Image: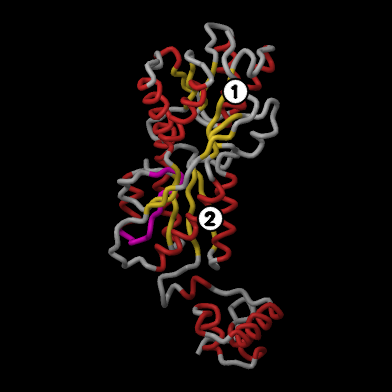
Amino acid sequence: MGRSRTPKGAPGIVEVAKRAGVSPATVSRCFNSPEQVRGDTRHKVETAAADLGYIRNRMAGTLHNRFSGSVGLVVPTIDNAIFAELIEAFAGRLREHDRTLLLAAHGYDLAQEVSIVRSLLERRIDGVALVGFDHDEVAMRMLATQSVPVLSIWNYRENSVLPCVGTDNRAAGREAYERLFALGHRDIACLFPAIGHNDRARDRREGALEAAAELGFPLPEKRLLDCPYDLGEAKARASKMLQGDCPTAVLCGNDIIAQGVIFACIAKGVSVPGKLSVVGIGDFRGSAHIEPGLSTVRMPARRIGVEAADAVVHLSDNVQSDRLPMRRLLTHRWVERGSAAALTV
């Protein structure tokens, strides 16, 4: 029989049981397997717990089962709006599953994944969601050794070994380029971040290059420009581009870069879209409210977050399943605003 109070005097399940008029075993079932407890009994237990300020000790539960109630989410950054919608939706959905989010960011440095994953494993996470398919081999081996379910999110590939929930980033890059091409643009520059350890950026860039080649206007090297996901850097590099041989349109690796390009145009007195059309990928918060509004490919960040949370909980609850990897493709869509227009001669 468990002791009535924790060492610091906080109420335990015995106090909750006495207040609710049930057994400690019923209180334990109510929190660990609520579907096995009648609704009116659950209500009495939950009311008693709230009155007493009882906090469930999940880590004590892991001594008897493998669930800690925590799920890890590792993203490249929380420094801007790129993943804000995703994180918010993922965390909110986890709460509906009675799970807690443990969030970490590696700053686009995959070498940091090893220490992040080790820290998450020490907390006995039920599962982990990782952005994309490019990951540190040591980190992935650690997760496999501990049999922790892993879900790849944000990107999608039909032959992925990992379960995944995301969009086809190659198709998104292709569509963005084709939209500019349909507006009459042939001299198009691409501003993308380094693609060595970023499969999302790599897929988008390759999709744009494929479309350009198939349409008969392969992109020359001078129009393939590196730019990190940073507003200030994007503005600076766009300013330099505007001073030289300027294209008629710019396709940006995401909306952060695109907003930087628009800000550079404002500073230089370059009309958007009169002189330069600008297109992004993402449709993050704020993209609709700058002037002009950003034309972009909408990535369904909120839906990815919700479905990813459902998926990682499902994988956690069915960790022994031998079924083929779960793969869910969520569609992107073109959002036309004011930053791109037909080329006028």
Stretch in magenta: 145-156
Decide if residue 123 is on the left or right side of residue 327. right
Write the residue at 49% across / 17% down: 188
Q: Position of residue 294 (x, y in %)?
A: 62, 29
Vertical side of 37 occupied by 224: above or below: above
Decide if residue 262 is on the left or right side of residue 24. right
- Other residues around mark 2 within 10 Å, as few (<14) / some (14–19) / many (≥20): many
- Front residue of 340/192: it is 340
Q: Position of residue 91 (x, y in %)?
A: 57, 56
Kind of residue indicated by mark 2:
Val
Residue located beneath label 2 in the image: 306
Q: Is residue 134 visible?
A: yes
Kind of residue indicated by mark 1:
Ala
Q: Which label number is shown at residue 340?
A: 1
- 244 falls in the magenta region: no
Q: Is residue 124 visible?
A: no
Q: Identify the element where label 1 is drawn.
A: loop
Write the residue at 49% across / 75% down: 60
Write the residue at 43% across / 56% down: 128
Q: Position of residue 152 (x, y in %)?
A: 41, 49
Vertical side of 306 occupied by 206: above or below: above
